[in-house]
Image (cartoon, grey):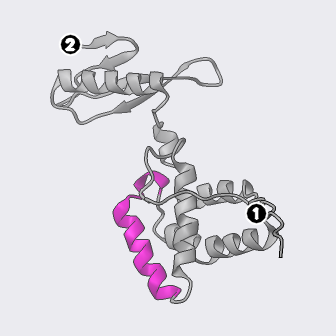
Amino acid sequence: MARRALDVYTEWRGGTCPVKWWTGEYHPDGRKRFESKGGFTDDDAAYDYGLDKMSEIRRGEHISNRDGATLMSDWLDDWLETLDHAHLTEKAYRSIVENHIRPYFKARNTAVKDIDVLSYRAFRKYAKGALPGSWQNAMMVLGMVLDDAVPKLIKVSPVERTPRRGKFTRKPRERKKDMQP
């Protein structure tokens, strides 16, 4: 028996019950865009999963399957376009991305959503071997790339650190009081 409410649909197909929910988006021809997940063996579990996804969409926390499947190589292109740093800093970031980060993830055909703590640690191990003197810089740039992917492509960044971004601006110095000799 098919269940339907709030644009969440379940229907038994074979031995499993897939669920389908509306993403809140429309195709160019005006049809609603749906996403789905299969493999459920319980109708209620599938329906609850669909309702949870609808709740995430309403809260603005949902990451669509299309966005999450973006390859890291494609995300690096978008990220490099948005850089706003001093000339030499931007040149250094581009060098690290093109020589180390992109080849590593392109060889593995990795999607951004597939980068978790373990793959982050695997890259750190690779960077320590390939860049003995400056692996920390490669990890810093990869951390920035993954932090910027958070609102659109992944829910949380696998990197934990304090953010410090943008061009360096010197703090204004306060004038010292004149002292009598």
Camera-side mark, 2 or 1: 1
Looking at the rendered structure, the kind of residue marked 2 is Met
Q: Residues within 10 Å of mark 1 (few under 14, many from 20)?
A: few
Element under disc 2: loop
Residue that mark 1 sits on? 170
Q: Is residue 20 above or below residue 120?
A: above
Secondary structure character of the magenta stretch overall: helix
Residue 161, visible in the rendered structure:
yes
Q: Position of residue 7 (x, y in %)?
A: 40, 14
Residue 12 screen position, x and y as percent: 22, 23
User: Label 2, label 1: how many angstroms apart (C-alpha)?
Assistant: 66 Å
Between 108 and 101, the residue placed more toward the observer is: 101
Left or right: residue 146 versus residue 167 is: left
Q: Nearer the viewer, residue 32 or 152?
A: 152
Q: Quadrant of residue 62 in the image?
A: top left
Q: Residues within 10 Å of mark 2 (few under 14, many from 20)?
A: few
